[in-house]
Image (spheres, rainbow, N blue to C red):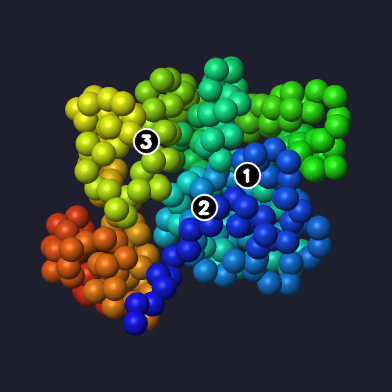
Amino acid sequence: MKQEPSISTHTLNDIVNILGDTPQEKNGLHVHFTKKRLDVIPLTYPHKGDSYSFLLVVSGAIKIQLNLITYTVQCNEVIVMKPQMVIHVLDMDHNLEMIVVSFTIDFIMNNFLERNEFEAWDFFTNSTIPKLKLSGEETESAIALSKLLLKNNATNTINIPFRNRIINYTFGLLLHHYSSIFKRDYPDLEIHLSRQEKLTLQFLKILNENFKTERSVQFYADALYMTSGHLSKVLKQVSGKTAGQLIDDAVIMEAKILLAAPELTVAQIANELQFSDQSFFGKYFKKHTGLPPSKFRRQAKLA
């Protein structure tokens, strides 16, 4: 009997339910404050999400693995999590207090595509520096903005005049707040979100939803109403990789995570990733990693 794959994909609403939060009003936006000491890690297993998140640690520390790389986020530090990332919380202090502002790509597309807030997107599009260190004053400002965002996004504030504008402006301020710190600390990494970067975000959203069943560049090009050649050219300019390479990256990352689950056979993983058979999956995996799946699994156990 086929077993369930070990990597779960959670929507933003799923995460809200797991954390025990009250759902909020704005579609695609949620603000989480830890209300009391966390005795256990809410999600103890690797998982993916469909949203971006700012995770700001107010006190204590949390050890978190993002795409198999481990980070320790301490007091006055903020880290960014993105769609497609494999997230695994490894440990946390009992006195951990954190604020997590999560939002989907649809929230950004619907509210900020034509606004100047997109100029502050550098912190998200850059993958080299996923964590920032804030001063005490900067942390206080982030907390105040997050509280204002939560207050207006709560379902019981629906009748507040100009509520949607307050939410959007407050979110824009928070985005600029973090981005200004990023630009100050890493001025040489400054980039601006052009039309090409917006297209890349759209591609990544579609990829995240379809990579298990669709590995044809033409499928994604058709979904974005362009030729496959133009799509790959744009993605190469933005990410350094073609559409085909990004598709392969998504499949291989998922395969590596699934191979780390001992209860799944290679045949089950091949089936989960929609390969025609185990042999074809094995050749594909070895082509992109240099190792057959079984050998990769043995080495992962020793790591």
Which residue is painted at 54% across and 35% down in the image? Answer: 106
Which residue is painted at 45% across and 51% down in the image? Answer: 85
Which residue is painted at 68% across and 31% down in the image? Answer: 171
Is 204 displayed left or right of 92 in the figure? left
Cβ–Cβ below 8 Å for labels 2 and 1? yes
Which residue is painted at 53% across and 22% down in the image? Answer: 113
User: Along the polypeptide, which appears first: circle 2 or circle 1?
Assistant: 2
Query: Label 2, on which residue?
Result: 49
Please tell me the numbered disc located at residue 203: 3
Cβ–Cβ below 8 Å for labels 3 and 2? no
Residue type, numbered disc 1:
Ser
Quadrant where the N terminus sits is bottom left
Please tell me the numbered disc located at residue 102: 1
Residue type, numbered disc 3:
Phe
Q: Is residue 114 visible?
A: yes
Crowding around mark 2 (Cα neighbors within 10 Å: few <14, some 14 to 19, many 20+) is many
Q: Is residue 303 visible?
A: no
Please tell me the numbered disc located at residue 172: none
Residue type, numbered disc 2:
Gly
